[in-house]
Amino acid sequence: MDSRDIAPDSWEQEDDVEATADTELQSAFIGLNVNAPEFVPSFLSQGPEENDTPDGTDAVASMEISEPVGTGHCVLLNPASTKCRHVAVTVPTAAVENGETDASAVETWEQKGEPDEEEPGSGSPADTGCSRDEEQDEMMEEDEEMPTPKLPPPLPDAPKKEHVNVVFIGHVDAGKSTIGGQIMYLTGMVDKRTLEKYEREAKEKNRETWYLSWALDTNQEERDKGKTVEVGRAYFETEKKHFTILDAPGHKSFVPNMIGGASQADLAVLVISARKGEFETGFEKGGQTREHAMLAKTAGVKHLIVLVNKMDDPTVNWSLDRYEECKEKLVPFLKKVGFNPKKDIHFMPCSGMTGANLKETSELCPWYTGLSFIPHLDSLPNFTRPTDGPIRLAIVDKYKDMGTVVLGKLESGSIGKAQQLIMMPNRNTVEVLSLLSDDVETEYASPGENLKLRLKGIEEEEILPGFILCNAENLCHSGRTFDAQIVIIEHKSIICPGYNAVLHIHTCIEEVQITALICLVDKKTGEKSKTRPRFVKQDQVCIARLRAAGTICLETFKDFPQMGRFTLRDEGKTIAIGKVLKLVPEKD
């Protein structure tokens, strides 16, 4: 076997040693005294101890030196210490001899390593005290230190894949995080060892079925309760596209977080549970299946994939009847929200726990003939995004890290490194120091990408979620008063001027007051009433004037849909959805 094919003893230094070995080094090593006190060469003092075996003892601890050092390959440093190092020293006598010595030393290392791997109890006396449990502990420690896999930056000549943000929405416990974790595993973004570690930890807490969701629920509180709180983020790639998973919380207390996630999405996946009783709970009044579907539509999601999850449950057992029953109940509601059942909605059965029908079609449901989930995502048509439009990046989050870092999705325009931008509504001039697209550094970003920008010229305290980055030539509009068309979805009593609610527009959350009702709009004909209404009630459409508590960034729906649609919430419920028709200038 060629010595190049075998793992070297010291990874980083092998080439350097070969390159610097000359006649002086040869003569120095011939005259070396093996019993001399400890001597650590400079090229080794910094090197990583890669040749330690998992049980903590050195693989060469009990190796004898049978040859003189000048011709051999092994140098024993500090014989008194239990830890000893294996130094690869190559003597440039003849090519064949060099190769032989290399191979022989590595072979002995291999022979030494093999019994250790098979039976941890055997080997040198130092090994005997080390049990299999200790080895597992060390392996677990290694696992914890393992960073999450990052995607390699694309090659300069490779065309950039289209970025698509997919938000997972649905009732609490429908299986959104589990499906997200399963997709990451199937696409190779989470390795098997990490999942096995999660499975072990989940088993200890008697939560065996939750381990897949831990790939996305990284927070300890989320793992303990089994509920997603913040919008989880993860990435995966297919042949044609680069996807970002936004794992939205299903619990009704965290709907504001879900709206923030949906506002960044291009595509929504509504996860519903087929298990008897669970689907009904999620779909009834007060269930999150209804509210989430409506909020996704309001946030501008055009395409909806409905995943009927938990088909492997004993109460369902891949039953076509149950699948059709869920479908029949959902379609009329989704139609009412504004999705077109023929073009915008696609239903498919799956199991997040087993991964059936996510990457490959399952034999368990021969009645489903369509593509499985990931190939279906890949086959969707591309999104049209204006690259030459004005720059609009809504801030989702911000933090300090060697400067001010902001996160957000680029809605239109393109951003490059060292570019000067304006932060609205405060009109601070900032410069882009570095640009990361899904944690991969890049020089240039196009619309639809999720970006992390390091900015110069602004402090982290001066930024709030909902601020907008724009170019100086085309600033976004900001103000407090605007006219909007509102649809009242759910409200027990009437709404009159003076009513207060919470406004969610793009990533901004602000308190607003309805200052005046201008007219009612007929739902079927679109005709506006001649007289001003004194109040509006559920299921009515009206045009009203709203005033925000502070200055917010917004655009009219006609000019820029992503920044012109909003929801109004009150008492933990979504009461209305609407679109901005006109911005009212402030009176000086």
Image: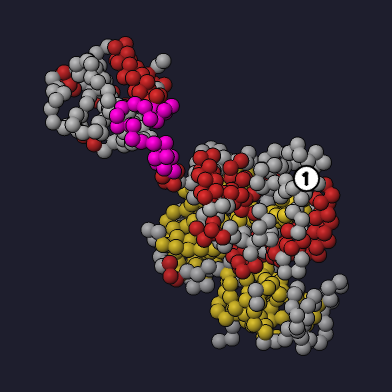
Colour mapping used in the image: secondary structure
Relative to residue 375, is residue 36 depicted above or below? above
> Is 363 placed left or right of 563 in the picture?
right
Residue visible at 24% across and 33% down?
82
The residue to which callout 1 is attached is: 318
Rendering quarter of residue 577 = bottom right
Q: Quadrant of the C terminus?
A: bottom right
Q: Provide residue 136's location: percent of width, then percent of height.
A: 43, 40
Residue visible at 61% across and 61% down?
249
Q: Camera-side residue: 336 or 379?
A: 336
Residue visible at 47% across and 69% down?
463
Magenta highlight range: 116-140
Could you tell me which secondary element the residue under label 1 belongs to?
A: loop
Q: Quadrant of the N terminus?
A: top left
For residue 311, say whether it is visible.
no
Q: Magenta stretch: residue 551 in it?
A: no
> Is 526 placed left or right of 476 in the picture?
right
Q: Residues within 10 Å of mark 1 (few under 14, many from 20)?
A: many
Q: Provide residue 167's location: percent of width, then percent of height.
A: 64, 56
Q: Provide residue 232's location: percent of width, then percent of height.
A: 56, 56
Residue visible at 71% across and 50% down?
309
Rendering quarter of residue 304 = bottom right
Q: How many marks?
A: 1
Q: Camera-side residue: 217 or 382?
A: 217
> Is 141 placed left or right of 377 in the picture?
left
Residue type for callout 1: Trp
Q: Provide residue 367's location: percent of width, then percent of height.
A: 82, 41
Relative to residue 192, is residue 27 depicted above or below? above
For residue 241, say whether it is visible.
yes
